[in-house]
């Protein structure tokens, strides 16, 4: 009985399902502190090309988060920390 309660609880904390908007993207990574205050990283897409800037302090924990943005993921009101291992 306890195991049946734990399994649904774990599923509640899984990250969102992401359906990519793009099948292919070329990514340029830059580790930098030159990012707007209050952000740990940002991804800017130009069609199938994407530039990711990430603070060294969150590398590599938030790489998946920013790559997901490059493929077209939008937060849709979810916490900004999805796919960042804080």
Image (tube, rainbow, N blue to C red):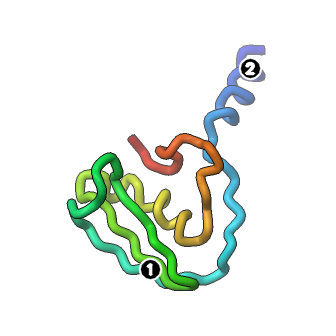
Q: Seen in the image, is 54 located left or right of residue 67?
A: left
Within the image, what quadrant is residue 21 found in?
bottom right
**Where residue 33 sits in the image (x, y, percent)?**
21, 60
- Looking at the image, is 46 positioned above or below residue 74? below
Quarter of the image for the C terminus: give it.
top left
Outermost left residue: 33
Residue at screen point 44% across, 67% down = 43
Residue at screen point 41% across, 55% down = 62
**Where residue 1 sits in the image (x, y, percent)?**
78, 14
**Where residue 79 sits in the image (x, y, percent)?**
54, 41
- Helix, strand or loop at disc 1? strand
Q: Seen in the image, is 30 located left or right of residue 13?
A: left
Indicate which label's residue lies in the foreground, 1 or 2.
Answer: 1
* Residue topped by disc 1: 27
Outermost top residue: 1
Instruction: Measure the C-alpha gap from mark 1 to mark 2.
Output: 41 Å
- Looking at the image, is 12 positioned above or below residue 21? above
Q: Earlier in the sequence, mark 1 or mark 2?
A: 2
- Looking at the image, is 81 positioned above or below residue 47? above
* Residue topped by disc 2: 5
Residue at screen point 68% across, 23% down = 6
> Between 56 and 47, which is closer to the camera in this rendering?
47
Residue at screen point 30% across, 56% down = 36
Q: Are marks 1 and 2 in contact (CB under 8 Å)?
A: no
- Helix, strand or loop at disc 2? helix
Residues packed near mark 1 inside 10 Å, few (<14), some (14 to 19) or many (20 plus) = some
- Looking at the image, is 19 positioned above or below residue 82? below
């Amino acid at each position: 009985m306890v195991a049946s309660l734990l399994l649904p609880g774990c599923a509640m904390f899984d990250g969102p399902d992401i359906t990519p908007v793009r099948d292919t993207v070329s990514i340029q990574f830059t580790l930098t502190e030159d990012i707007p205050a209050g952000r740990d990283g940002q991804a800017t897409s130009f069609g199938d090309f994407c530039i990711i800037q990430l603070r060294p302090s969150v590398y590599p924990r938030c790489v998946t988060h920013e790559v997901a943005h490059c493929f077209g993921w939008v937060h849709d009101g979810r916490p900004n920390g999805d796919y960042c291992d804080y």
